[in-house]
Image (cartoon, rainbow, N blue to C red):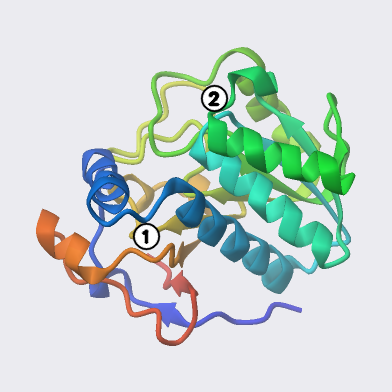
Amino acid sequence: MRTPMPSVEPDEIGWLTEAQMVEVDRVMIEELQIGLIQMMENAGRNLAQLVLQRFDPSTVTVLAGSGGNGGGGLVAARHLANRGVDVSVTLGQPVEKFGPVPAQQFEILQRMGVDTATDPPRSDVVIDALIGYSLTGAPRGRVGELVAAIGDIGGRVVSLDTPSGLDVTDGSVPGLVVDADATLTLALPKVGLRDAVQVGELYLADISVPPSVYDAIGVAPAPDFSRGTVLEIATL
């Protein structure tokens, strides 16, 4: 049974382009000293919460890319495993190509004994954490293969920040794209998600961005997370 999340109307919050989200990340890391590992932990914990509360799965497959988006998926895998879910992880790149923080998250999962599979197993829910907001052309290589196969892996698909393959600024699809049942976007929603059918249900997660950061880049209003760290954005 679906457990409702607190909701917010689309016009009650600001919406970001890719360039603005890059600036949010820069301010967080360089000026406020709120590091990637902290934001990644917040993203992954909220993603696990959404998956459990919305779909209550027994099995979850996490598809993780090599960047911050993949790291958030790996954090979610840890939280889900800690809650008794049977979790399997498939990487979109060899771990040697991962950034330092996502690589550390993968090492934690290995130490925990979380399953890693070259061929992702079927599961109740698939987490798409392959490509974040910095899309550069159509998904290709192993990531493209996983995007193409995602519909055959699980019953429900939950994307982190954006369905992989979707341009978050203009909503265009340069090639393969994930068709998600739900998307958990981070900080503020991205403008390209607003009319994209691939998004499914749209949720927003608190990753601890202070409202002053949005004020500094001229995007308002900031979301009110006082009712919970995950908000459902009402049907657009």
Q: What element carries label 1?
A: loop
**Residue 90 image position (x, y, % from top left):** 76, 32
Quick one: 152 or 135, which is closer to the camera? 135
Label 2 Cα crowd, 10 Å radius (few <14 / some 14-19 / many 20+): some
Q: In this view, does 34 lie to the left or right of 120?
A: left
Instruction: State which tag comes first along the sequence, 1 or 2.
Output: 2
Quick one: 141 or 1, which is closer to the camera? 141
Q: Circle 1 is placed at which residue position?
A: 187
Residue furthest to the front? 33
Residue 169 higher or lower than 124, as above or below: above
**Residue 209 image position (x, y, % from top left):** 33, 63
User: Callout 1, which amino acid?
Assistant: Ala
Question: In percent of the image, x 69 and y 63: which residue is there?
Answer: 51
User: Callout 2, which amino acid?
Assistant: Leu
Question: In percent of the image, x 35 and y 57: which residue is there?
Answer: 189
Quick one: 196 or 161, which is closer to the camera? 161
Image mark for residue 176: 2
**Residue 104 image position (x, y, % from top left):** 64, 38
Residue 99 higher or lower than 49, as above or below: above
Q: What element carries label 2?
A: loop
| Res 234 quadrant in image | bottom left
Q: Specify the quadrant that holds the C terminus.
A: bottom left
